[in-house]
Image (cartoon, grey):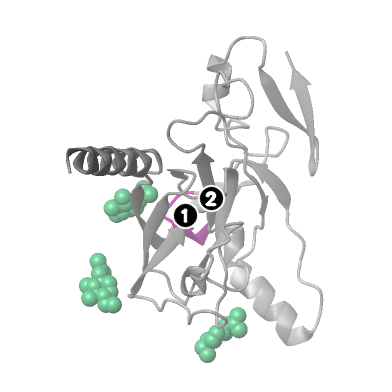
Amino acid sequence: MGICRLGFLVGFLWFMAMDCMAQSNTHHYNFVLQQAQFTRLCETKTMLTVNGSFPGPTIHARRGDTIYVNVHNEGEYGVTIHWHGVKQPRNPWSDGPENITQCPIQPGKNFTYEVILSNEEGTLWWHAHSDWSRATVHGAIVISPARGTTYPFPAPHAEQTIILGSWFKDDLKAIIDDALAAGSEPAISNSLTINGQPGDLYPCSAAMLNMDPIFQGSGSSIVIWRGTRAGAWTRFSL
Ligand SMILES: *[C@@H]1O[C@H](CO)[C@@H](O)[C@H](O)[C@H]1NC(C)=O
Ligand SMILES: *[C@@H]1O[C@H](CO)[C@@H](O)[C@H](O)[C@H]1NC(C)=O
Ligand SMILES: *[C@@H]1O[C@H](CO)[C@@H](O)[C@H](O)[C@H]1NC(C)=O
């Protein structure tokens, strides 16, 4: 009887230990889809964003975690959000393609996505999945290794997310609506962007990159990206 109880206790502790090791956390984010004004290439436009930022907020999680994102639509038309690269097994209701797995979130409404990470690790991204709204409604999902595990390479001195995008001077919805109505090719972008900036060779452009933390690195791994001509970026290592 005594041995039996001991065996049970050891088994129970082992079970608890395994449970702790496999522990995954949940994260909660609120995304507010809202129009915001931005000035690039000497012109100011109003565009759809998450929380008024371009690119949008970064989601941080660890492998195996679950992320809940309540998306409040304060914009002017229906939008969905897709969690690009997240497999979402048996959870298509939270995958986001408009009119395929869900109806668009209507203006004034909200919808809570359940983003279930399984073996994803590294940097993925989220983006709107309604027409071209993804051009301004997107951001990174940074997934660190699970608790108690390490990177499959030496720990980095600093980390910097680099998000490449396109800048259109005109209203995106108008561009795609016109192209669909006319059956023609949509207009191409006016510049590319890195972390929301077109680069200091474009007129009226602010500091090229919004990425100061990389300069706090080890001193041996500083990288600068420079716009050398329209649409081209060159990597300079110091
Ligand atoms: C977005 O804005 C809302 C409302 O101000 C705020 O509650 C929320 O924390 C913000 N989300 C992010 C990811 O910054
Ligand atoms: C999805 O359905 C809504 C409502 O019928 C419609 O307004 C919208 O254009 C559709 N979206 C796409 C991408 O077809
Ligand atoms: C989110 O939508 C639900 C209805 O689906 C509503 O009851 C709730 O008040 C909304 N929450 C916010 C913060 O808007």
Q: Is residue 46 above or below residue 236?
A: below
Between 181 and 105, the one nearer to me in the picture: 105
Residue 176 percent across, percent down from the top left: 68, 74
Label 1, ligand 1: CB separation under 8 Å? no
Q: Residue at x 59, y 43 (%)?
A: 123
Main secondary structure found in the magenta portion: strand
Residue 28 percent across, percent down from the top left: 33, 53
Tell which residue pokes out farthest to the top in this image.
Answer: 219
Task: Tell me the amino acid under the disc marked 1.
Answer: Gln
First to last magenta residue range: 45-53
Between 173 and 50, the one nearer to me in the picture: 50
Q: Which residue matches tag 1? A: 37
State yes or no: residue 131 in magenta.
no
Residue 194 visible in rendering: yes
Between 232 and 156, the one nearer to me in the picture: 156
Label 2, ligand 1: CB separation under 8 Å? no
Q: Is residue 151 above or below residue 230?
A: above
Between 56 and 20, the one nearer to me in the picture: 20
- Tell me the element at label 1: strand
Q: Residue at x 19, y 42 (%)?
A: 5
Q: Quadrant of the N terminus?
A: top left
Q: Is residue 186 above or below residue 26?
A: below
- Tell me the element at label 2: strand
Residue 183 percent across, percent down from the top left: 79, 84
Q: Give residue 36's quadrant in the image.
A: bottom left
Label 2: few (<14), some (14–19) or many (≥20) C-alpha neighbours in 10 Å: many
Q: CA distance from mark 1 to mark 2?
A: 18 Å
Q: Which residue matches tag 2? A: 139
Tell which residue pokes out farthest to the front in this image.
Answer: 1
Q: Mark 1 or mark 2, which has the lower sequence index?
A: 1
